[in-house]
Amino acid sequence: MAHPSANEFNSVMAPTVEQQLATIDKQGYTIVQIEPELNRRLADTVKRLEDELDVRPKMNRAEGYNTRRMYNLLAKDRAFWEMPVHDQVLPLVTGLLDKWALLSGTTAMNIGPGEDLQGMHTDEGNITLPRPRAAMMVVTIWALSDFTAENGATRFVPGSHRADREPRPDETDGAIAAEMPAGSVLVMHGGMWHCGGPNTTAAQWRMGANIQYCVGWMRTQQNHYLGLPPEQVAEMPKRLQQLLGYGLYRGAMGHIEGLSPGAVIGAEATTQRAYQYTETRSIQGTSA
């Protein structure tokens, strides 16, 4: 059975969160749209930072030989603070994971002409639990410029989140290009086989961002505790602080001397004391 292209799927995308989650369960992905003004602002910010920080290719297959890649976006500009909590994206993330989900990483990826196929992989590749399984991570690929098959649009294999193994890097059978206009966001089950596509154009750059999430008990890919100045975290909205791990997982995990990380750095929005849910002496009606 032929799978629809990303553009074809987007045109008939289910409008409700419940329907979108059902689609992800079946096919492994869905596509949503964000505001054009926000997308332009994000793209302009990435371009400016690439120049200011003199961002250059990392010169390896995973990160690219002709790709400008930036990590730890939240520390680089406040424009990026809107991305992890966007109301078209976060409900799908928490629906796939749970309300205690963490932000695992924020990365801009600007694929330049001449870039090779990255190599098929999943972002859950380091997890040793048997496949297939419920999502441990959610990958969101933001198209900050138009994504086309020629300029390096993300390649992915629909339904591969149900595979019982990880892919080989050269295993591209059944892969399609996530062709989508700027302002689209591809939301994927973390077990989906995918990779950055080759850029065969003469002069087009394919600008995107990966805003990635994981279940609350898992170690994140990027270390936000050291990557973000505490004074910045203290000024962030509460929901973003929670996604960064400054609250407590299920009211207990992650505390410091019985206090949440938010309490320790003075982020009042996420100030908690561990085990507050046990303050009543009776165990009846309590839940962690």
Image (cartoon, rainbow, N blue to C red):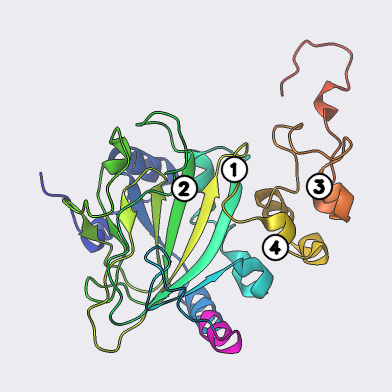
Q: Type of residue at label 4?
A: Gly
Residue at numbered disc 4: 227
- Residue at the spot 38% in from the left edge and 42% down from the top edge: 191
Residue at 59% x, 48% y is 220
Task: Report the amino acid beneath label 1.
Answer: Ala
Amino acid residing under circle 3: Pro
Which sits earlier in the primary sequence, circle 1 or circle 2? 1
Label drawn at residue 224: none
Farthest left residue in view: 1
Say if mark 1 contacts mark 2, CB within 8 Å.
yes
Give the mark, 4 or 1, whose residue is nearer the N terminus: 1
Which residue is located at x 26 percent, y 67 percent? Answer: 179
**Looking at the image, do the residues carrying marks 2 and 3 touch, with CB atoms under 8 Å apart?**
no
Label 1 element class:
loop
Dot 4 crowding, Cα within 10 Å, few <14, some 14–19, many 20+: few
Q: Which mark is residue 261?
A: 3
Marks 2 and 4 sit apart, C-alpha to C-alpha, by 21 Å
Front-most of 202 and 14?
202
**What stretch of residues is rendered in magenta?**
46-54
Task: Report how far apart the C-alphas of labels 2 and 3 lie in the structure.
Answer: 24 Å
Q: Which residue is mark 2?
A: 138
Q: Nearest to the eye among marks 3 and 4: give it.
A: 4
Q: Which sits earlier in the primary sequence, circle 2 or circle 3?
A: 2
Alpha carbons under labels 3 and 4: distance apart = 14 Å
First in sequence, mark 2 or 4: give its number.
Answer: 2
Marking on residue 101? 1
